[in-house]
Image (cartoon, helix red, strand yellow):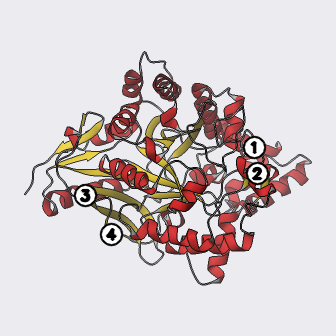
């Protein structure tokens, strides 16, 4: 028997529980067969071929063990990041690197950028390439979160934006459409459905007309470059917007149902650890902010940025690693349980950093520090179910004020372990009237998400969190709350184009880019 078959047989018999156990099994077979260590994608390809030809019984656990980078699928969906072409940016921020072959603020040696460069920034090729990689490494790809990065999205030409997203959809659909609208309709029932679409932009570019355009493009989530809530710091770094514009953009987006993530940069010029802690407190004590998610990018010095000259002249000095780790530990300890901390460091290779933190596993380092101090992070990412469903999950409700309205965060949680299996964000604007008619008098479902290992639409595993009905139960409870407690007879969902069919089955219909149900009030 060849080495691949031998290793698959051994793995079937032992079913290793950790990556270390898997690697030991690979090492034993490599020594025995005098071959290099076998890659997971090679093993997966052989396993699937054997199953298809009746040479091996299907084994879901074995397939799961061989899936690379499981963290990419335990959020319940597969993520594909695409990068827009290099294009001027309206910003003048002193910390931003500038490379001729990259969008403003990005470096060509960052992992996502390297993939984009290999594909000449072509959106179709970028999506096809990522789909192939995900499938080869064992990930289901029928539910996709598409994340568009690169410069300030709202500053790109409108025609380019439409074409870019249409070509992403064409790649997911497997057919080329005549228009963006046709591509969106095709994706509603495609093999690879775009269930969420994220763009990055500046707070000062958000207004009512921009929100309408984002919805026409299919966007469901917006990442805002906030960076700091200290006006003095914003002025010093030449950010060219104020905190008032952050609050205004947040309110407009929230009342249109968008999910909102803030980019925040501790360690900026002019800021101290005390200033950064004050920004954090203001972020969640002031109801005009309270984002759903955060990406924390500690400021570092890049040679192509204006800040490099400041650093050389002694006008800027970044925090030492110890100061930054303590600051981030405080951040994670204070973040409310309805917030997801998506990142605590950016993927900038250490060779490109002239000064600043170069700790690549910064999140893990911070979590270890917190554990030593008897503290823990209760953000969504740290609490989400990783794989199998264990214990008894109960429905929890948390209400809070935000942007002149009520937010209701519903979730299924295992109380003894604090694990989070699913959640829903219900928005109830204070004013029933809305500048967008379809949303007048409506309660808004801004997000519905089930965690656990990403299963395909037709997979039904008894031990998995997905497909256990949590989503429908959360939706039913949200409808009840809106109808009975707030007298809202209309529910509007900011649904990605690929999840419209799910809501149609539950009585919703498409109206002006939203999935809407009129149920009356009791």
Q: Foreground mark, 4 or 1? A: 1
Residue at the extreme top: 178
The residue closer to the viewer here, 502 or 4, is: 502
**For this rendering, which residue is in front, 90 or 439?**
90
> Which mark sits nearer the N-terminus, 3 or 1?
1
Disc 1 designates what residue? 304
- Pointer 4 or 2: first along the chain: 2
Assign a secondary structure to mark 1. loop
Mark 3 vs 4, N-terminal side: 4
Percent from the top left, x then y, of residue 406?
27, 62
Question: For the residue carrying disc 1, how many other residues have a C-alpha within 10 Å: few (<14), some (14-19), or many (20+)?
Answer: some
Instruction: Give the Cα distance between marks 3 and 1.
Output: 49 Å
Kindly indicate whether the residue at mark 1 contacts the one at mark 2 (C-beta within 8 angstroms): yes
Q: Which residue is mark 4?
A: 398
Left or right: where 277 falls relative to 317: left
Q: Is residue 125 above or below residue 383?
A: above
Q: Quadrant of the N terminus?
A: top right
Q: Is residue 85 visible?
A: yes
State how far apart marks 2 and 3 are (Cα).
Answer: 50 Å
- Residue depth check, mark 3 versus mark 1: number of the one nearer the observer: 1
Residue beneath disc 2: 308
> Residue drawn 53% across and 75% down?
333
Q: Position of residue 349 (x, y in %)?
A: 76, 50
Spatial separation of the CA atoms under disc 2 and disc 1: 7 Å
Q: Which residue is mark 3?
A: 478
Left or right, 167 with respect to 99, comes to left
């Amino acid at each position: 028997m060849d080495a691949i078959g031998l290793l698959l047989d051994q793995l079937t018999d032992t079913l290793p529980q950790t990556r270390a156990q898997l690697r030991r099994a690979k090492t034993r077979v490599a020594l025995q067969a005098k071959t290099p260590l076998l890659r997971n994608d090679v093993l997966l390809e052989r396993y699937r071929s054997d199953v298809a030809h009746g040479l091996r019984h299907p084994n879901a656990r074995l397939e799961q063990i061989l899936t690379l980078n499981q963290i990419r699928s335990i959020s319940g969906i597969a993520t594909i990041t695409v990068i827009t072409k290099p294009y001027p940016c309206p910003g003048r921020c002193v910390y931003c690197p500038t490379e001729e072959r990259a969008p403003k603020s990005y470096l060509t040696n960052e992992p996502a950028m390297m993939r984009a460069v290999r594909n000449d920034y072509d959106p179709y090729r970028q999506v096809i390439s990522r789909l192939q990689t995900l499938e080869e490494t064992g990930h289901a790809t029928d539910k996709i979160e598409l994340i568009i990065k690169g410069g300030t999205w709202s500053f790109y030409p409108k025609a380019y934006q439409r074409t870019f997203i249409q070509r992403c959809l064409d790649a997911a659909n497997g057919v080329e459409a005549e228009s963006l609208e046709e591509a969106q309709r095709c994706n509603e029932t495609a093999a690879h459905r775009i269930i969420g679409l994220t763009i990055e932009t500046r707070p000062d570019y958000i207004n009512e007309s921009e929100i309408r355009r984002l919805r026409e493009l299919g966007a469901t989530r917006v990442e805002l470059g906030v960076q700091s809530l200290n006006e003095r710091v914003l002025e010093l770094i030449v950010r060219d917007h104020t905190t008032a514009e952050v609050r205004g953009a947040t309110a407009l987006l929230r009342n249109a149902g968008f999910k909102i993530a803030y980019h925040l940069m501790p360690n900026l010029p002019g800021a101290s650890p005390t200033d950064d802690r004050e920004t954090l407190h203001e972020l969640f004590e002031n109801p005009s902010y309270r984002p759903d998610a955060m990406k924390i990018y500690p400021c570092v010095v890049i040679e192509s940025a204006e800040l490099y000259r400041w650093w050389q002249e002694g006008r800027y000095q970044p925090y030492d690693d110890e100061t930054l780790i303590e600051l981030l530990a405080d951040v994670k300890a204070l973040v409310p349980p309805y917030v997801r901390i998506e990142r605590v460091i950016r993927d900038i290779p250490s060779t490109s950093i002239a000064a600043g933190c170069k700790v690549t596993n910064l999140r893990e380092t911070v979590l270890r520090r917190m554990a030593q101090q008897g503290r823990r992070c209760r953000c969504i990412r740290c609490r989400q179910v990783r794989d199998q469903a264990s214990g008894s999950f109960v429905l929890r409700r948390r209400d809070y004020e935000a942007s002149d309205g009520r937010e209701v965060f519903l979730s299924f949680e295992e109380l003894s372990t604090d694990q989070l299996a699913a959640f829903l964000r219900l928005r109830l604007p204070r004013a029933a009237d809305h500048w967008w008619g379809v949303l007048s008098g409506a309660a808004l479902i801004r997000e519905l998400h089930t965690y656990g290992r990403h299963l395909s639409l037709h997979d039904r595993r008894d031990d998995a969190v997905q497909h256990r009905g949590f989503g429908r139960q959360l939706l039913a409870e949200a409808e009840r709350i809106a109808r009975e407690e707030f007298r809202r007879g209309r529910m509007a969902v900011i649904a990605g184009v690929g999840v419209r069919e799910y809501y149609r089955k539950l009585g919703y219909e498409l109206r002006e880019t939203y999935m809407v149900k009129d149920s009356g009030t009791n």
